[in-house]
Image (cartoon, coloured by chain):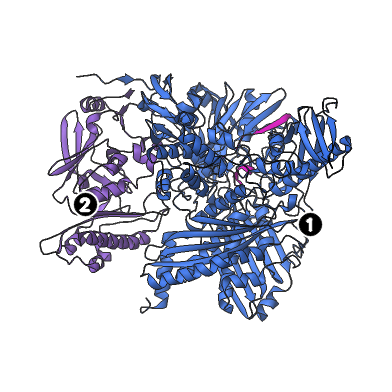
Chain colours: A purple, B blue
Amino acid sequence: MFLRPTTLYDATRALAAGGQVLAGGTDFFPALGSCPANGTIIDVSRISELRGIRVAPDHVRIGGATTWSEIASAPLPRCLNALRSAAREVGAVQVQNRGTIAGNLCNASPAADGVPPLLILNAEVELASADGRRRLPLREFLVGNRKTQRRPDEILSAVILPSNLSDAPSVFLKLGARRYLVISISMVAALLSRDRDGLVGTARIAVGACSATAQRLTELERDLAGQPLGRELGSIAAPRHLAPLSPIDDVRATAAYRRDATLTLIRRALHSCAEALA
Amino acid sequence: MSAPSIMDQHTVARLTFVVNGREVWISSPPAARLSKVLREDLGLTGTKVGCDAGDCGACTVLIDGTPVCSCLVAASQADGCQITTVEGLKHRAPVFDRLQKCFLARGAAQCGICTPGMLVTATALLERNPAPTETEVMDALGGVLCRCTGYRKIISAVLAANGVGDPPASPPAGSAVGQRLVRLDGQRKAEGTEIFGADETPAKALLLRAIRSPYHHARFSFEDIGSYLAAHPGVKAVFCAQDVPGRNCFGVIPPFADQPVFAQHEARFRGEAVAAVVGEEEVIERLDLSKFPVTWEERTALTTIEESLAAGASLVHANRPDNVLVRGRVVRGDVDQALACADAVVEGEYETSFVEHACIEPEAGFARPVGDGIEVQACTQSPYMDRADLAAILDIPPERVRIIPTAVGGGFGSKLDLSVQPFVAVAARHLNQPVKMIYSRVESIMSTTKRHPARIRARAGATRDGKLVAMDLAADFNTGAYASWGPTVAARVPVHGSGPYVVPHYRALTRAIHTHLVPAGAFRGFGVPQCTIAQEQLYDDLADRVGMDRLEFRILNALSDDSLTVTGQVLGEGVGIRQCFEALRPRWTAARAEAAAFNLAATIPFRRGAGVAGMWYGCGSTSLPNPSTIRIGLKRDGRIVLHQGAVDIGQGSNTIIAQICADALGAPFAQFDLLSGDTAISPDCGKTSASRQTFVTGKAAYLAGRALRKRLLEIAGACDRATLTFQPGRVVAMESGESHAVDLSVLPLDHNGYVLTAETTFDPPTTPLDENGQGNPYAVYGFGAHLAEVEVDTELGTVRVLRITAAHDVGQAINPTLIEGQVEGGVAQGLGMALMEEFTPGKGENLHDYLIPTIGDIPHVETILIEKPSSVGPFGAKGVGEQAVIPTAPAILNAIHDAIGIRLRKVPATPDRIRAAILAARRSEGPHAG
């Protein structure tokens, strides 16, 4: 069965009977290898309510089937700069033109480029099923390597970003062994705000590709709050702050390198946020 | 509420597209990849499939003007959309028309397999942004991989698409050599009409897929094949070792042939084929091959040189003691004594990795029974070798095997060995029906040959005034489970291990060691790139030790026409290595000064450096016959047919051989019609490898051109000063204002169907090497030197190559554009080898874990061509194909050392290795070091 619903309602009803969701296809087809697709496939790419970005006063809502190219070219608040940078680093143009934000999250690769920039925005995901909709924080949605809280009958219909820090600068740094079309060895997203005294107000740091799911470094965030926004800000980041990470040795790099390089990326990301605030 | 529209993917969906401006209605499984539908249902084979995973971009098409990988789109997702493929770009003129001309004029298409993806993507860019910057071009094309060109000519073509003139007109008679002529096969590549291995299949061809070992080493037995066939009605047949009619064994070097078509009882590497299933395409595609009735019994696998050499190690092949396939040896003088007396001695150990060719075209082809013989059409670098092996496998005479080589979508050595050919040939012969096979990317990476991993120990000594006195080198190569080209690597490396320098006392001992890994074979340079990584880093250390400038040290020691090589050969002419180094001097001086200034001004973490490395490489087979035969025929209409049997794998032999032949004959280049390396049509021009086609086949073409000229002049009664004019029905020889005509209409046709035929063979003059490797292994060497400038991020261990300056002595540049293409492509592969390319069997059998450089990784390359002719070659020309890749990696490694003072002795120098080396150096310098 190959279904092409045009409304989310129809899609969720169809999915209730079982099937695989297909959107941009950038993870769906590689997973097939040389075999043709089997079973029920529900193509959600024609559902207009899953597409597009809406900027409301207190939040930004990104439809699940919005592509990375659409995110990269949308006018968005400053706090989404990291997300837009990440959008330009997902694969290359061909993949950005098809790949969707919901697909990136539901595929739940440890190296998903979209996750760290969304974690620093305290993103929530909206899951729709025939039973209705529910929301949960992205950090709870992602539970492991290729594992999420999505029930088989649910479609990730939107990502919701609270924009209480919409003017805060954010940065995304991706480290790979080549330019373009590269899976991250490590990546860091950072967001900083300035308080009334000119010190760090809120600091948010997330690291990807160094654990089964990307992690916020909350201890570091606490240590940064209230610090002066100078050149030395980065030096606050210390190896102990990486405790939430559990990098592995793989074809891309050693675990030891990932820890070491991540610290450098964090320092650089903080530096560049601090410069943007200066 | 509206019911979702439902389609049954196992039957078909009726879809409507506007493809290239034309509305088409097709029936297709709705979830079929769009790439498959375009190629198979609509016959638009210009869209190439390189990976089926979005990793290579070869299948890029425009959907409603937007570039996408068509392998990642379900056909029904494109229902109602406008689709543009490379074949339709001409309807989007004038952007494409200009772009296509620029691609051809600037040599932006080599093998042509990525060209459709590049053109489609670039067209989308130019429609949106008519005057892009270089960065914008890179951002736009970053999703399309190219393995041949090194991308620079592609960037240049896209940047030039707005406003360049037409490509140069065809030159008059006698002036083709040295011209930047557009490649003869370029138009097809730029239009997407070139036929590669997977692009043509006879009607009713069955599909074959191989059952491959999931283990490095395993015993296996089949369960009940009869029941399997009964349970799978669409599967026509299963083949295994017992179905091979002749010898279940092949290999590129007959005395070492050891690789079975299908393994018997024991699989010696992960990916080795043990059986094949054949049937209707729709059935075979849906088979879950992991359910094939075979029982595996995993055995201990030897995966490293150390394990295979360990005392008591089991044998990969019972008849090869100590797991040594072959040894190589070149010894001259008294190395131990000379090193003991040298003023300065340095030593080092170096290690390199498996490198994957990563041709963007996976291996593909078909076989069909014809009469009492068989035709095999596939991508190959060596049609006549394929013919000989297939004849033995099928147990029929070679004359009954016809090899029709398709265009080759990247070769680099990997398509010298058989891949799909024996499987489809055996199956087609049994079933008396055409059978096709197309490797998946995974299958291609896991089962085809690789560059040999090397472990090299070397010592070198010099006098205090910088004269090299001795070098001692021992190199072991992991040759994998079967011989392939292991013997060639073991033989070539000792000859080349000195580098292009005078080294009076020399000892180089090599071994090719079997392991239970994918066979290592031929890859651009046959082991010389690996040993040059060791030797050129070692010589840098030696220059430092004696306190000499690293470039001047090389110039001082460079070979000259009359010096002795380490095999005792005096080349006598055509030794242009000193000129190559000297050509780098201005940039070397500037680069070092610029790096020093940068490092003084910059704060940590960025450090810049410059490095240089030299190279020599013998053209043709090592001390073995490797003749080429060229046939040219003159037709009654005055056109000349060139039987050009040298397979053009993108490097340009179709064009270069014709340029040489044209000038030797004295006919205009445009007068030639080209025939391919089809074994039924063209004589044997040998394999496309060892940088031999310009040199060996080119010389055969030169001789054939001269022979035909001589005959024409004889008939006309003119002397060699005469100029020839080719017209329909006659050839006119003009001499001192007097014309002598040859009336072609009255000459009888010979058995080739021509009024005149010339067929000549050239085999380069070499001598055998004695037990110490002394002799003349090659008639001609190519020389070159690269200068790399790099920036190292010392905190992350990443390296950005800023610029490469490459000087190559090519004897005579037959076609400078094509030579630059070889150099830039070689630089890209060398950069990949230095910084990112490492294949670990069993891990990352795809193009997102195995990384090759993208368009964003390759710096500006300045090519300097040195022409020190060697009279053996045609018009003095030498090969450049492999030469180009050899010096890049050591130059980059030397530049990294210059930048940060650390030697990277294991390649690739990945960010984690560089960073670990930096941290280790800091630790050893103690706590106070900076």
Q: Residue A110, position in %: x, y?
A: 32, 48
- Toward the viewer: B161 or B397? B161
Where does label 1 land, which residue?
B768
Question: Which residue position is annotated with label 2?
Answer: A120
Write down the chain letter for disc 2: A
Locate residue B771: give its quadrant.
Answer: bottom right
Q: From the viewer's perspective, tell me whether residue A114 is left or right of residue B526.
A: left
Q: Quadrant of residue A147?
A: top left
Mark 2 secondary-structure assignment: loop
Q: Looking at the image, is B638 positioned above or below residue B784?
A: above
Residue at 51% x, 68% y: name it: B590
Mark on residue B382? none
Classify residue A99 by image quadrant.
top left
Q: Give the range drawn in magenta.
A: B400-416
* Residue at 61%, 47% in the rendered image: B818
Residue B480 visible? The answer is: no
B446 is within the stretch colored magenta: no
Residue type, label 2? Ile
Residue density around tag 2, few if under 14, some if 14–19, many if 20 or more, within 10 Å:
many
Q: Nearer the viewer, mark 2 or mark 1?
A: 2
Tell me which amino acid carries mark 1.
Pro
Q: Which chain carries label 1?
A: B
In the visual, does B422 lie left or right of A12? Answer: right
- Please state if B752 lies on the left or on the right of B445 as rendered: right
Q: In which quarter of the image is the C terminus of chain B?
A: bottom left
Do the residues bearing badges 2 and 1 touch, measured as CB atoms within 8 Å? no
Image coordinates of residue B593 in percent, x first then y, are 48, 71
- For mark 1, give the secondary structure: loop
Q: How far apart are marks 2 and 1 (CA)?
A: 69 Å
Tags 2 and 1 on a common chain:
no
